[in-house]
Amino acid sequence: MIKFRASSISEIMTDPKGKGEILSVGAKTFIEYMAKEFVYGFREEISSKYLEKGVLVEPQSIDLRNDVFFTDYQKNTERRENDWITGECDIFTGSGIIDVKSSWSLATFPATRIKAAKDAEKAGYDWQLRAYMLLWDVDCAEVNYCMVNTPDELIGYEDVSLHYVDHIDPSLRVTRVLYERNFDMESKIKEKVEAARAYFDLMTEMIANDHAEEQS
């Protein structure tokens, strides 16, 4: 029985246009690709300079967050799962979740909470945080957008002034988006996962049957 990663749960959470349906067209497309990966035994890893920076500078972003808010949080290494989802949050405070997102440059860094909230929703981070709250059984979570120096090897031909930021007040380089737990939304996650599992099973069976017919 498949379980969905918190980092990708937003892919199935969009509302369908048709009445009486649970999964949107986009959600079905995502699940169809999951079924293909499963049947053929591969896993596509998406890579980009933006994601690479996020991995490389995560320790610095956590340090920045700690410096600004006078905390001493450490990177979480525990992965949790329940009957529907699995995930590994960035920071577990003991009573809440913090997810750190390292912005690519000053141009992409959200300077206000309103912009950060819009960016988080567009990227699906809101659902990711709700999945973490469900997994860790906590009542609050937050996305922290952090702006730290970009590694030289990733900058390329871009203006370095957009990437070298140590001279800027640290408090201006962290923007927080706060979320409170919502049990109705958690129920929606469970409902979507159940529907996604049924569609996943249908797709894997269809792939097998289509190719069985070709061989007969």
Image (tube, helix red, strand yellow):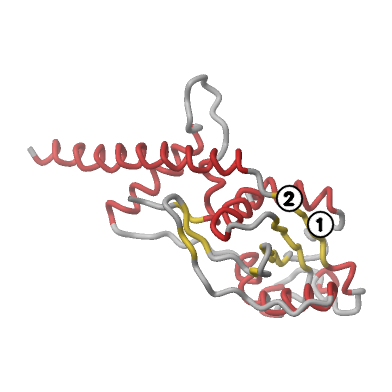
- Amino acid type, callout 2: Asp
In percent of the image, x 46 and y 44: which residue is there?
30
- Amino acid type, callout 1: Pro
Q: Report the side of 52 relative to 209 (left or right).
A: right
In percent of the image, x 19 and y 38: which residue is there?
209
On screen, 128 above or below 22?
below
Residue 162: x, y in percent?
83, 68
In percent of the image, x 49 and y 56: which residue is there?
5
Count neighbours of disc 2 (C-alpha within 10 A) and say few if under 14, some if 14 to 19, many if 20 or more: some
Residue 49 occupies quadrant: bottom right
Which numbered dot is residue 110? Answer: 1
Mark toward the start of the polypeptide (1 vs 2): 1
Which is nearer the eye, 61 or 84? 84
Count neighbours of disc 1 (C-alpha within 10 A) and say few if under 14, some if 14 to 19, many if 20 or more: many
Badge 1 element? loop
Residue 174 occupies quadrant: bottom right
Which is nearer the eye, 103 or 172? 172
Which numbered dot is residue 119? Answer: 2
For the view shown, which residue lies furthest in the left direction?
A: 216
Q: Report the side of 4 relative to 65 (left or right).
A: left
Q: Does the residue at mark 1 contact the one at mark 2 (Cβ under 8 Å)?
A: yes
Residue 136: x, y in percent?
57, 60
